[in-house]
Image: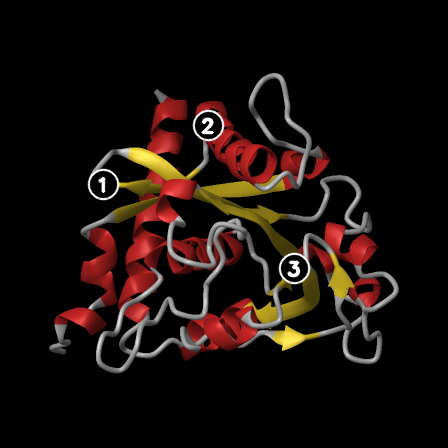
Amino acid sequence: MYLPPFLDLRAGFTSRFTCVPATTNALREACFRIRHDVYCRELGYEPLRPDGLESDAFDAQSVHCLLRAKQSDAFIGCIRLILPKPGGPSAPFPFEKTCAATLDRELVDPSRMQRSRMAEVSRLAVISAYRRRKGEQESPGTIQPGDFGTPDRPRFPFIPAGLYLGMLVQAQRHGVETLFMLTEPRLARHLSLLGVRLQRVGGPVEHRGKRVPSMLSVGATIKSFGPIVRPLYESIASEIETGYRAREAASAA
């Protein structure tokens, strides 16, 4: 199907970026270094670390994704997917602690769900050189109000969209059906433009600004992608699968 250039998201993304699963210690350290630059040095969300790596106890049960800029061959963004704790699947996810008082238990009660099929998306971070538009400096890299441009001058937020889609790929690969995340209230509206339907499941909390707990169905979201977003998703899925195969081949050698 022919798409005008500004709607050919796969071509626009693959000409600029590559999604890389963090399958080695070196790649995971690249995630932690980006997070330190953004969360510790720039935004002050976390204390500075002597080693320049921002990590926490949940990283041991997480899979991570990086975004590489083809022009510089440098990693410019990252995101993680927190999976159930091995040997302790009933251990709460971070959002369950942060939103303990605001979750609407009539909508969703994570403690009663099939926890092996749950995960939480967090720690999205994009380096400052790629967050220079007005209003982005105080955000770690989420989708912003003007990221889709205007009817006369459309554009697309390839960087955060690529990272969020990368997490959907990782979630499907690891058998996750329900994703939770803490989001800015406006993010749900912007993700809906990608075909991602977030369901708000509780009241707002103060967590590095106003945030609300949300969830989405991985299978239903992927199934809902139309002819504009689906080629981009499939391209990112192929890149991530290639990264895993390369790691498996290196381990077998």
Residue labelled with disc 3: 117
Q: Which of the image's four quarters has the C terminus?
A: top left
* Residue positioned 43% across, 41% down in the render: 127
196 to the left or right of 246: right
Q: Can residue 66 be seen in this view?
A: no
Q: What residue type is labelled 1?
A: Lys
Q: Dot 3 lies on which element? A: helix
Q: What element carries label 1?
A: loop
- Name the one closer to the observer, 19 or 125: 125
The residue that label 2 is drawn on is 24
The image quadrant that residue 56 belongs to is: top right
State which quarter of the image contains the N terminus. bottom left
First in sequence: mark 3 vs mark 2? 2
Nearer-the-camera pick, 81 or 243: 81
Residue 70: which disc? 1
**Residue at screen point 68% across, 52% down:** 208
Q: Which mark is residue 113?
A: none
User: Residue drawn 70% across and 66% down?
Assistant: 213
Badge 2 crowding class, 10 Å Cα cut-off, few under 14, some 14 to 19, many 20 or more, is: few
